[in-house]
Amino acid sequence: MPEFLILLLPIAAASGWWAAKRSVRKEREKLRNAEIDPAYFRGLNYLVNEQPDKAIDVFVRMLEVNSETVEMHLALGSLFRRRGETDRAIRIHQNLIARPTLSSEQRSQALMELGLDYMNAGLLDRAEALFSELIDNNALINTSLGNLKIIYQHEKDWQKALDVTRRLEEIGEEDQSGDRSHFLCELADIALQEGRDEDAKNYLKEAGETAPEAMRPLLTQATLSLQQQDYTTALRLYQRVAETHPAFIGEFVNQMAECHRATGQEQAWLEWLKALYQRRRSLYVMLAIADEIEHSEDGDVAIRFLNDELAANPSLLGVQRLIRMRLTQQGSGKTTFLETLDALVQSMTDTQSAYQCHRCGFTTRTLHWQCPGCRTWGTMLPTSENNGRYSE
């Protein structure tokens, strides 16, 4: 190695040490300059002392000085919304959106948060406008469509809700066929109320094709056929529902009995019920058998049948039916004891829940296609306490 290169080695080492020291000094200065503004602590102190308005004023003034605090303001607004202080959340997010220095990503997030604020405040038209703007800007599309779907369901705008679910499926969102089927059934119900039977049939047909295993399209078609006195079609549809969704037979067992009686098939009805009861024990099938025996044979035979079944599988509704059969037998000689007992059992059955949402646990006495608690579709199932569910 040439001698002059050897002489340069100490100089190079010294230069490296000096550069490294200078770099460390710059980093320290940078950290000192990045120290948290004392105003933040002032704002946090206001929050701790439950003075949110003063805290917001502090943070908004800081935003006007330093737009790098956007994430903190987004988090603060979200916190206020979760606490139910929606007006404060709106104020923060509106101030954010007004800032011209926001990046497109930050602006989109602020618009999303403001839309959620409006939803929480019940200002659905404003929320809808913001989510639509995000979609038009090709930003946060999945979340915006999901929020629009919630809004349209709340407004009962089933056609728009249907359109949104289709778009969600197009962009690869999870399967929406169950919800789409319910939206089509809602449109069918409206068409039936307005006397547009053909439109209703078309909606129901599409609903069945959308979700072939769904109960609601079949049940609505059966009800429509029954109203039109097409008992054969209605009966075929009811039987199909009974085979695929046996736990819900209590919803339509009386309609099935009406179809059989209208077509003079009482004996076939009784035989079908007995065969079904042998396969799956159900309270409602048992009660239907007892009613049919009482109607076609003899009240004493029906009472003996109920006594035997209730001894093995007791239920309040079964006991109530037994009491009323006894009262019918007594006619004008009804005893005060049986009438009092009937009233007592009635008060007990009135407090029973017939259906429960398997997602959120909400209970109700009537079947809702959409859970009133968590707003999901098709999650209500018969409760075991009401003996609405089949046991194998």
Image (cartoon, rainbow, N blue to C red):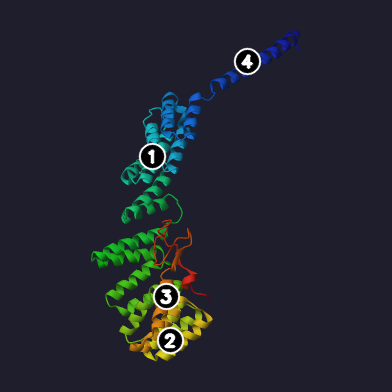
**Secondary structure category for the residue under label 1:** helix
Local packing at callout 4 (Cα closer than 10 Å; few below 14, some 14-19, many 20+) is few
**Secondary structure category for the residue under label 3:** helix
Measure the alpha-carbon separation of dots 3 and 2.
34 Å
Front-lying residue, 322 or 229: 322
- Looking at the rendered structure, the kind of residue marked 4 is Arg
Nearest-to-viewer mark from 4 and 1: 1
**Secondary structure category for the residue under label 2:** helix
Q: Is residue 174 above or below residue 366?
A: above
Q: Which residue position is annotated with label 4?
A: 22
Name which of mark 3 and mark 4 comes first in the sequence: 4
| Residue 269 visible in image | no
| Mark drawn on residue 114 | 1
Give residue 278's position: percent from left, percent from top.
50, 82
Q: Which residue position is annotated with label 3?
A: 344
Nearest-to-viewer mark from 2 and 1: 1
